[in-house]
Image (spheres, rainbow, N blue to C red):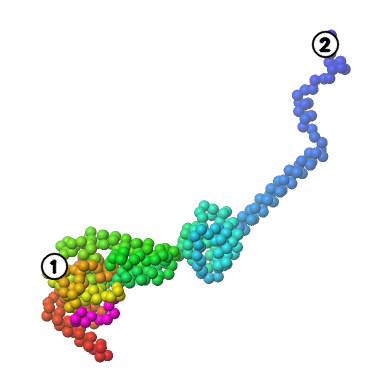
Amino acid sequence: MPEPTQSDPLVDPVPTGPEVSDASRKLPAARRCNIGRLVSILIFFLIVCATLAGGGAVMLNRAYIEAGPLAADASVVVPRGASGHAIGALLEEAGIVADRRLLLLTTRIFAPDRPLRAGEYSFPAAASLREVVAKLQAGDTVVRRMTIAEGLTTAEILDLIAVTEGLSGPVPEQAAVPEGALLPETYHFSLGDSRAALVARMAAARNAVLRQLWAGRKAGLPLKSPEEALVLASIVERETAVPEERARVAGVFINRLNLEMRLQSDPTVAYGLRENDAPLDRPLRRRDLEVDHPYNTYVHRGLPPGPIANPGVASIAAVLNPAETDELYFVADGTGGHAFARTLAEHNRNVERWRRIQREQRAR
């Protein structure tokens, strides 16, 4: 069969490449217009959403950092195990935040890394959400404190701890806490801390102080152990309330121990006359000095069998680094301090002066 020619009407001309491409891109004008309008609407919608989202973020950030509704400083206790919703409700009820939902929302957005922690918190007036959240996440709880005065007995300290508000649980049995075992100091604690744990901290503090001061003691002291130093420190603590006198009083007792003289300390006598661990509630009488009990340093030479109180750091330090003195006596001088003497004759004159002051005081 003969090959068809280009002019043969039964054969379609073969379209070229460019003609095919142009034909495939040709669409009706109306359809092109609709697609363009949809694209424009979509772009406008995205712009509106972004604008609204940006505005909402700005408003939320402002609510997070601006002053809160609290009119005056306030404290709240966040219980252990409380959920975020419960904490929000607690803060809203206390007037610390305006809306619990806003607290939870801002926390999730701006501070999602750490949970809100339990405890007792104090918030200043007008605290912002950011300040509230930061405090709760950091566990920046209220720090309470109690001060234990130097020279108290262990029984007295345990009684104070037993009635201190904010602590939990019972105090340890007195038999488990020896006399002199606790360090008088100011101690900080948080709401709910246990009384037993606080007592343990006091004992650990005393051990650390005694160990450190014993290591730096003056050479040649007539003290065989840290425990003996503690006993003498408790006597010094009870003998004087004048800080400048501690090392001097300690020097007198060190001299008497070196000479094997009786310490003749009134506080040791009074300690031995206690009843039911209650301090003696009357002045010592002359006949008290003759009562034979282990703590009577008028009757027995050397140190008593144990501390008579809980001495502070200054008294322990004074005993381990006493003043260099040749004095052997001291007696009250009527001003709150003491008159010191080297000889018995000088001491007797000081004693007579003190008795005259006492008579004048009674007469007035």
Instruction: Give the CA distance from mark 2 to mark 1.
Output: 143 Å
- Image quadrant holding the C terminus, namely bottom left
Q: What secondary structure is found at the residue carrying circle 1? A: helix
Is 168 placed left or right of 290 in the picture? right
Range of magenta residues: 279-288
What crowding class fits label 2: few (fewer than 14 Cα within 10 Å), some (14-19), or many (20 or more)?
Answer: few
What crowding class fits label 1: few (fewer than 14 Cα within 10 Å), some (14-19), or many (20 or more)?
Answer: some
Label 2 or label 1, whichever comes before in sequence order: 2
Q: Position of residue 71 (x, y in %)?
A: 55, 70
Is 38 placed left or right of 352 in the picture? right
Name the residue located 49 percent from the left edge and 66 percent from the top edge. 122
Q: Amino acid at mark 2?
A: Glu
Q: Is residue 85 magenta?
A: no
Q: Position of residue 178 (x, y in %)?
A: 28, 65
Instruction: Determine the residue located farthest toward the bottom in the rendered image.
Output: 363
For the stretch drawn in magenta, the main secondary structure is loop
Q: Which residue is mark 1?
A: 258
Q: Is residue 284 magenta?
A: yes
Q: Which residue is mark 2?
A: 3
Q: Are marks 2 and 1 in contact (CB under 8 Å)?
A: no
Q: Quadrant of residue 356?
A: bottom left
